[in-house]
Image (tube, coloured by chain):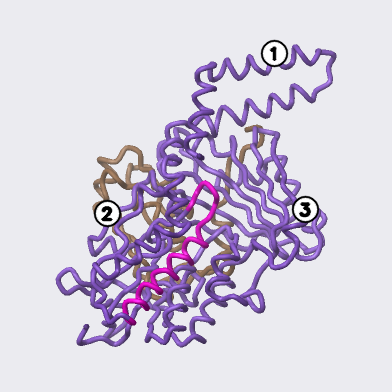
């Protein structure tokens, strides 16, 4: 046991993983200190943002009663953009329109503030406007944190690092190295305000029904990346993100906000966002290195949860649900260790990794472990194919006296010409293998 | 691209954001300005920074003004060859304050 201890546990950060962890710990009666550097929880946090209900339901079953939710998603569109066109799929279902809803759009600043109020109600001490500068170590054991306040040394049996993608504390302590540019995406986004009825009409929804559009294509200039457009109650969120090493090696040296502006001006997008009043511009790194980029997650007196541990399933655009789940599982590990009277050493906290392995978190990350590598090595999925597919549609749908058989041959020739037969088969195989 | 955003006014975007600037205490520093000027050819930070905090000056130097920083961390991560960016979070309560996130 820690002789100087002030708290059973310290949680650094008040995003989804930190809040899930602090809430679960406090609910179980532990003495918890949560430290957040923002003016209020959420003021430093950026996400698309889609909330997946399941992960939160397992922590706060009745969250729908008072959580600030924007729209529940009834329609998912996937678009592949060429310069002036898109081809895509829309999936819309009345099943998604029956409560309890599965997915919602949220505004993170408001949502995190709400989540934090629940953490306080559960009994945790939440301190804002305080940056944790470093971990306090006794040998290789973490015994507390030092904050940027006078006399800011606080001690606890265990420190949970929910400090976000930059993971500064674990890096400074030498638990893992610097993030690699190939393992993170840089995303930028804007929020555009529009009247509720305009959003409903443009996206063919009523009440609080919502639509999400995920897109790939030439807007990323060949970089591995995606764009998105989400409907909120009275606003739209539009954004684009690409792998950071892609930005670095892009010969056009394009700034992220220029990509965003190009996306906004794409003729398929411009009409949807027209007249929107921009009220905030955000940027954020997203850890997309997947399974192979996950650092060491626990040690004597410490655990890593959420973005800080790289818990994002990029293939399915999932992150906050992994964050909440890792936060909850870390908390449950601590609670069980206490009940068993165990010290919070590396051997005890390994139970956290076992819980992760048994959950969807590690199973999904493992399933898509080859995806980052496949996408990095095969930029044609973001350049050649969007062009080919859009031109194929253009060819088939243009009525110009050319017979359909000739058009089909022309399309096949364009595919074969760009990638070759072996290339086409190889691409199909690579995608299948990465997704299987 | 047929419609390309040739000039984007980043100041206009940042103007919509809320900040509490920690005057005189920048949270990011270029460790050795000479390295940027003499050794770094790419100067990737000057176009990758989403708030355009880094500027490539005519004389080959790179200057940094952190007031509009969005605290993403990209500048530190892209500076792989030289690791010339000293990057900390702002003091508690300072820096960008997202209204919507």
Shown colour of chain A: purple
Q: Does the magenta stretch include residue A336?
A: yes
Callout 1–callout 2 Cβ contact below 8 Å: no
Q: Which mark is residue A409?
A: 1
Q: What stretch is highlighted in magenta?
A: A313-339
Q: Is residue A9 left or right of residue A204?
A: left
Residue depicted at 72% across the width and 47% down the height? A91
Quick one: which chain is brown? B
Tag nearer the camera, 1 or 2 = 1
Q: Mark 3 points at which residue?
A: A203
Judging from the image, what secondary structure is the residue with disc 1 in?
A: helix
Q: Of callouts 3 and 2, which one flags the residue occurring earlier in the amino acid sequence?
A: 2
In front of the other: B94 or A388: A388
- Is there CB contact under 8 Å for labels 3 and 2? no
Subunit that carries the residue with mark 3:
A
Instruction: For marks 3 and 1, give the one nearer the viewer.
Output: 1
Question: Label 3, label 2: how many angstroms apart (C-alpha)?
Answer: 44 Å
Disc 3 packing (10 Å; few <14; some 14–19; many ≥20): some
Tell me which corner region of the image, top left, top right, bottom left or bottom right, holds residue B101.
bottom right
């Amino acid at each position: 046991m820690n002789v100087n201890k002030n708290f059973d546990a310290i949680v650094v950060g008040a995003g989804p993983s930190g809040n899930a962890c602090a809430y679960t710990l406090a609910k179980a009666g532990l003495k918890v200190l949560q430290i957040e550097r923002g003016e209020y929880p959420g003021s430093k946090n950026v996400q698309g943002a889609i909330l997946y209900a399941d992960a939160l339901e397992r922590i706060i079953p009745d969250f729908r009663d008072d959580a600030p939710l924007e729209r529940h998603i009834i329609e998912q569109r996937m678009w592949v953009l060429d310069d002036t066109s898109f081809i895509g799929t829309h999936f819309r279902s009345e099943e998604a329109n029956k409560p309890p809803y599965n997915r919602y759009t949220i505004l993170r600043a408001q949502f995190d503030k709400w989540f934090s109020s629940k953490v306080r109600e559960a009994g945790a001490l939440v301190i804002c406007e305080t940056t944790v500068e470093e971990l306090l170590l006794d040998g290789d054991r973490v015994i507390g944190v030092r904050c940027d306040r006078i006399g800011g040394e606080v001690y606890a049996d265990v420190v949970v690092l929910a400090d976000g993608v930059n993971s500064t504390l674990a890096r400074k302590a030498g638990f893992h190295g610097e993030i690699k540019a190939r393992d993170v995406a840089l995303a930028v986004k804007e929020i555009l305000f529009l009247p509720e009825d305009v959003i409903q009409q443009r996206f063919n929804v009523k009440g609080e029904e919502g639509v999400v559009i995920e897109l790939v294509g030439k807007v990323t200039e060949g970089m591995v990346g995606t764009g998105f457009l989400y409907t909120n109650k009275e606003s739209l969120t539009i954004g684009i993100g690409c792998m950071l090493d892609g930005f670095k090696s892009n010969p056009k040296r394009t700034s992220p906000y220029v990509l965003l502006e190009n996306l906004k001006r794409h003729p398929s997008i411009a009409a949807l966002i027209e007249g929107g009043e921009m009220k905030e511009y955000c940027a954020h790194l997203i850890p997309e290195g997947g399974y192979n980029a996950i650092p060491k997650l626990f040690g004597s007196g410490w655990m890593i949860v959420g973005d800080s541990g790289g818990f994002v399933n990029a293939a399915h655009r999932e992150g906050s649900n992994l964050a909440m789940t890792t936060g909850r599982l870390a908390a449950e590990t601590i609670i069980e260790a206490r009940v068993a009277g165990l010290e919070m050493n590396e051997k005890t906290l390994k139970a956290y990794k076992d819980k992760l392995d048994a959950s969807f978190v590690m199973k999904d990350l493992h399933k898509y472990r080859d995806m980052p590598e496949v996408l990095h090595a095969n930029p044609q999925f973001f350049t050649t194919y969007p062009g080919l597919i859009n031109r194929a549609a253009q060819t088939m749908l243009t009525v110009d006296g050319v017979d359909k058989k000739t058009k089909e041959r022309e399309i096949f020739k364009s595919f074969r010409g760009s990638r070759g037969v072996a290339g086409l088969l190889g691409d199909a195989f690579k995608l299948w293998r990465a997704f299987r | 691209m047929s419609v390309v955003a040739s000039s984007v006014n980043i100041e206009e975007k940042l103007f919509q954001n809320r900040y509490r600037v920690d005057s005189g205490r920048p949270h990011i520093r270029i460790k050795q300005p000479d390295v940027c000027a003499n050794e770094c050819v790419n100067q990737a930070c000057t176009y990758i920074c989403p708030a355009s905090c880094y500027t490539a000056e005519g004389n080959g130097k790179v200057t940094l003004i952190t007031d509009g920083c969005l605290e993403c961390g990209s500048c530190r991560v892209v500076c792989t060859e030289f690791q010339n960016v000293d990057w900390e979070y702002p003091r508690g309560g300072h820096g960008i304050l997202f209204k919507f996130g």
